[in-house]
Structure formats: structure tokens, C-alpha cells
Amino acid sequence: MPQLSVPTEAVLKRAIDLIGQDGLSDDDIQQRITALVDEPVLAQRLIAWLPEAFGLVLISGMDGVDPPAAFTARDRRGRWREFAFDAEPLLPMALVLANEMFIAGPRYSFGRIAQRSAMVAAVSQVLQQDGSVFGARISGPAIAGVQAEVYSAGAGA
């Protein structure tokens, strides 16, 4: 299995800026990130993972929430397979940059990106229904648009 590519920090920051930019549609983000990296699989990984990294930083700071350590991706046959977060090599740098933006800002951009996270959506839904997430265990994201085979031919559940 070929090694997954990891963008430079500058490219990652540019992708973060695009996803956090006000007024861009999902199609605009898709087109601009695809043009930015000129590698369709990397573009899909950036679009899928950057919001989840920001969401993970946000929910990890919530009292009483047990953040996930794994994600799922669908294979070519349509089956969901689970992988540890370390299967995605761009996640560590994305988490560092998300944490930096959470601390230093701009908070508005941080929030725009984190709101795209499936994990944040799940937490928001629980808060609306129950008023508290204390003791909640959040499932990891289901990564759409990136096939499980990208992460490993033999790993996963």
C-alpha cells in the first residue's frame, strides 16, 4: 500500500483558511482545495479531516466528554471499517493548528470549521435533547468521500 501524502504546513494552513472562509459553498471549497493540492485523494482527506480535527479540539475541552480514538470509512463493497486516528497522517498537524487557532484565534474561523464536524453535530444534538453531555462517549467520525482502502488493505474491523 502506498504511503499517504501529507501536505506541507503552508498548504494545510491555506486549506484551513478556505474551509473557514465565509461565503464559500461546499462546491467552492471542493474546487479550491482540489486545485490547491492537485491530488484528488488528498483533497478529499483535507475536506473530510480538517473539520473533524477542529471538532475534536472543541469537544476534547468539554468536561465529561470521552473523545473518540477511531474513525470509520466505507470500503469499495460498502462496508464500514474502523481505524485508529493514527491511520490518518495529516491529523497530528491538523490538531496542532486547530489547537493554536482555538487558543489564539480567530475564533470565528475556528467555529466555522468546527461546525462542519460530524462529532460537533452529534454533541450539539445531545445538548439540545438532554441539556448535558456529561459522561457521553462520542463516536468517531464516519469519513465520507475517502475509501477505507486508502488507509489500509488489511487493517480495520
Image (cartoon, rainbow, N blue to C red):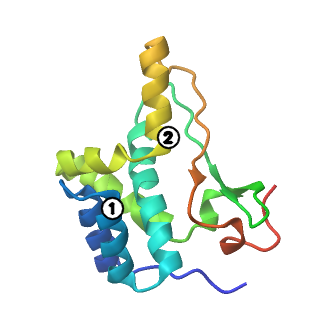
Residue 51: x and y in percent read 40, 53
SS at circle 1: helix
> Does residue 91 appear in this view?
yes
**Quarter of the image where one finds residue 101:** bottom left
- The three-letter amino acid code for the residue at tag 2 is Met
Q: Which residue is mark 2?
A: 119
Q: Which residue is mark 1?
A: 97
| Tag nearer the camera, 2 or 1 | 2
Q: Quadrant of the N terminus?
A: bottom right
Q: Quadrant of the C terminus?
A: bottom right
96 or 37, which is in the foreground? 37
Q: How many marks?
A: 2
Residue at the location (34% across, 55% down)? 98
- Residue 118 versus residue 101 in the image, above or below: above
Give the mark, 2 or 1, whose residue is nearer the N terminus. Answer: 1
Image marks 2 and 1: residues in contact by CB distance under 8 Å: no
27 displayed left or right of 157? left
> Does residue 63 appear in this view?
no
- Residue 74 versus residue 42 in the image, above or below: above
